[in-house]
Amino acid sequence: ILNVEQSPQSLHVQEGDSTNFTCSFPSSNFYALHWYRWETAKSPEALFVMTLNGDEKKKGRISATLNTKEGYSYLYIKGSQPEDSATYLCASSSYNTDKLIFGTGTRLQVFP
Amino acid sequence: ETGVTQTPRHLVMGMTNKKSLKCEQHLGHNAMYWYKQSAKKPLELMFVYSLEERVENNSVPSRFSPECPNSSHLFLHLHTLQPEDSALYLCASSQDRGDRGYTFGSGTRLTVV
């Protein structure tokens, strides 16, 4: 994998449903994996920065896991709420560059 | 407010105009970035400044000219742009490599006519 890829592109869920999305990234020279939440007309907001293989991070109802050997990360949202509606971006960086490369994002819409 | 302020929020300019985008942060961060967001494309890194020195120029055309006069301010000077340069331009800052994440501004929506 040369680029950061996210799936699905978009997701519609009912309030109360749990959901998850995937981020695939280049595993060679891996340095860090970032997750951001981007609401319409606002700034992207950092959720997690993860560096260690097997790492799991949690923030309220949102959690993320990281597998650096196979190059993927999952973001989970438990009991989705309408205010969780946003685009979720992941980005990865490597040791030999200052570049943070972003995926195209997963757009989540939570219906009441 | 995130601590990173971008002005203007919206800009419409002709292809022969010269304009500048401004980004300001008072978070004490030592790295600043310009990203471009075009429709249905990922955020695309344009420039990276670390300690006020440009460390990354991601093959950006010379009609985009960045300037970082100090660690709190970053400019993007625009000259003879093309309609395909219309996009959302986002500024971000971080401490070092951003191990605690980047802080983004709200962006400037640029339309070139």
Image: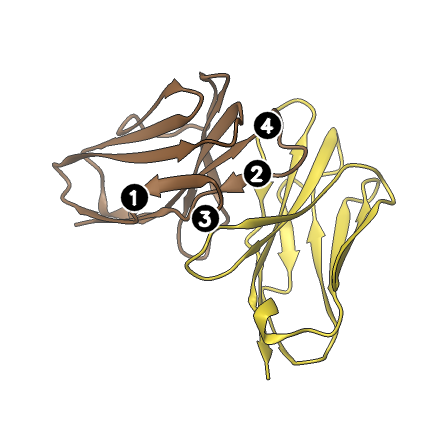
Instruction: Work out whether mark 3 precedes mark 4 in sequence or the reverse, and give the earlier one.
Output: 3
Residue at image mark 3: B1
Type of residue at label 2? Tyr
Instruction: Work out whether mark 1 precedes mark 2 in sequence or the reverse, and give the earlier one.
Output: 1
Tell me if mark 2 has few (under 14), some (14-19) or many (20+) residues whose alpha carbon lies within 10 angstroms of its own.
Answer: many
The number of discs equals 4
Tell me if mark 3 has few (under 14), some (14-19) or many (20+) residues whose alpha carbon lies within 10 angstroms of its own.
Answer: few
User: The chain shown in brown is which?
Assistant: B
Residue at image mark 2: B102
Tell me if mark 4 has few (under 14), some (14-19) or many (20+) residues whose alpha carbon lies within 10 angstroms of its own.
Answer: some
User: Spatial distance from mark 2 to mark 4, Cα to Cα?
Assistant: 8 Å
Residue at image mark 1: B85
- Residue A74: image quadrant is bottom right
Say whether mark 4 and mark 2 are on the same chain.
yes
Percent of width and height locating residue B93? 51, 33
Q: Label 2 is found on which chain of the structure?
A: B
Residue at (45%, 48%) from the top-left corner?
Answer: B1
Residue at image mark 4: B95
User: The chain shown in yellow is which?
Assistant: A
Percent of width and height locating residue A48? 69, 47
Q: Secondary structure at mark 4?
A: loop
